[in-house]
Amino acid sequence: MNFYRDATWVLEYVEQEDEKGRLSGSMQTLVLKSCQRYKLKSDPKHLYAVVDSCWRYKALLEKIMKRSKIYDDIPKKKGKPIYSRLTLLLMCHDLLISKQKRIQMGKLPIKEYVLKHKTRLNSELVKLKLKLKVKSLSEIVDKEDSSNDVTPVRWIRINPLRCPKNDVEPVLKELIKKFPQRVSHWSDITSGTLYYDEFVPNLFGVHPRDKITSHELYRQGKIIIQDRSSCFPAHILNPGKNDVVIDACAAPGNKTTHVAAHILPEYTREQTPKIYAFEKDPARANILKKMTSVAGCGQTVEIHVGDFTKLAVPANFKDVTGLIVDPSCSGSGIFGRKSVDSHNVAKKKTETDSEIPDEEEKMVGDDVANRLSKLASFQFQVVKHAMSMPNAKKIVYSTCSIHAEENERVVIDLLLDRNIKEWGWKVASREEVIPKWPRRGKVKEFEQVFRDDPVKCNELADGCIRALPQEDGGIGFFAVCFKR
Ligand code: SAM
């Protein structure tokens, strides 16, 4: 019941935000915010999966539920129905829409109540499908889902830290059992097939409809769901045995755990290397803690809760050789925003929410240019601070934004900064940054500043990596590596 209770809180929060016209950001962000606000204990990823799906089917489900008369005979206490409308919605969602088609809880009166209406609910579902001339309601929902606002591939990284002797082969064998057919390009992925990524080791693509969050491998932390381009930073940094790494903006911890997957296998069990992870937001830091522990690097990752630019005093981190800097950004490359955004456009509301903790979200009420400019100056500060670490040799800066303001233009501002020039930082060449990845930075942006040096502009743009949402098989992304 705890899960349904938590999911009800989240759904209620989403509904309230919607009613106030403040539905902003992605559904993931809304789930995280409500987890934090209500101190929910359930796995945020599981909550997200259920609430997101329930929200998308809500209008159709409510029609079915109303016609089934499930709301009509809810037992009452002091004149009030004892079951929450949203808990019933979540349960009907699981019963009618989820893959397992069942309510995931023990024998409790509320479950019995819903099951009492099962026949009626199913017959209303059939009637609705006939009326809408569809075989499955997903045909309607997928169409409404702003057409392209979902990832074309679910990317799975095998986590060596949870594999005996760091050997990923047995896990791969397990994956092959579930996805027996191998395809040679991600765009050929269909349900049940497996794609071996050509850019990032131990990374595989499956069809987004093939749910794997209930798989044992996922529960045991042996596989981690992580978008392909989000794997680029740790792959580019490629830290080894002699490296000490800081992840400056770490939660929820995808890149931190990926960094650990590079470093830890190089050590024996007795040795304990350190990875420092900074996270400003305490609630997100808790998620980071959970994620590092599930991924098997909880002992290695030293979490610092607070602002990286203030807490990470360079003199105290003389051992650091490499940094991952993945600060808050506009998130314009992320999926799952469109349906939420379109609600807002339709409602034409101005949004100002001082309680929202993330930089990205604080900017929501500003006009786009102003917002991007504030984000860019914040991103510049964080990278510049990373560059002030006295013995750092390599820094990977990344965003999940498609805007040049947060990407190439931040790189330009960094390259023009006097201190940074003195510290000797340069953009690493294409050869060092996944050379075979075809989509590179925007030359035009560099040409606006370094007009008389076309070679330099091409080299700088080539040193940057871009990924377009959908077109490149995942989220929109930018990454660049600085070295000295
Ligand atoms: N790298 C993470 C991953 O791959 O899972 C995602 C990082 S997310 C884009 C940015 C994170 O930086 C947010 O959790 C945000 O709270 C945090 N953050 C923002 N400003 C920060 C600061 N000054 N110091 C430390 N963390 C910060």
Image: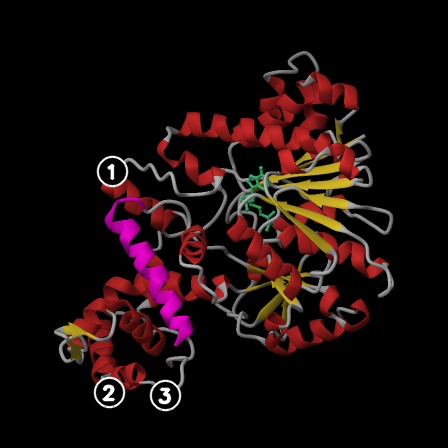
Residue kind at label 1, given as amino acid type:
Lys
Residue kind at label 3, given as amino acid type:
Lys
Q: Residue at x 33, y 56 (%)?
A: 13
Nearest to the observer: residue 449 or residue 455: 449
Front tag of 2 and 3: 3
Q: Which mark is residue 107?
A: 3
Which quadrant of the structure image shows residue 6? bottom left
Q: Disc 2 versus disc 3: distance between alpha carbons?
A: 13 Å
Front tag of 1 and 3: 3
Q: Residue at x 51, y 31 (%)?
A: 375
Choose the circle earlier in sequence order: 2 or 3: 3
Residue kind at label 2, given as amino acid type:
Lys
| Ligand 1: quadrant of the figure | top right
Q: Are marks 2 and 1 in contact (CB under 8 Å)?
A: no
Q: Disc 2 versus disc 1: distance between alpha carbons?
A: 42 Å
Residue 349, visible in the rendered structure = yes
Q: Residue at x 48, y 37 (%)?
A: 359
Label 2: which residue? 116
Residue neighbourhood size for the residue with mark 2, other residues' Cα within 10 Å, grouped as few (<14), some (14–19), many (≥20): few
Task: Please identify the quadrant where the N terminus is shown.
Answer: bottom left
Choose the circle earlier in sequence order: 1 or 3: 3
What secondary structure is marked by label 1? loop
Q: Are marks 2 and 3 in contact (CB under 8 Å)?
A: no
* Up/down of 171 relative to 236, above or below: below
Label 1: which residue? 348
Choose the circle earlier in sequence order: 2 or 1: 2
Which quadrant of the structure image shows residue 171? bottom right
Q: Are marks 1 and 3 in contact (CB under 8 Å)?
A: no
Q: Position of residue 163 (x, y in %)?
A: 74, 70
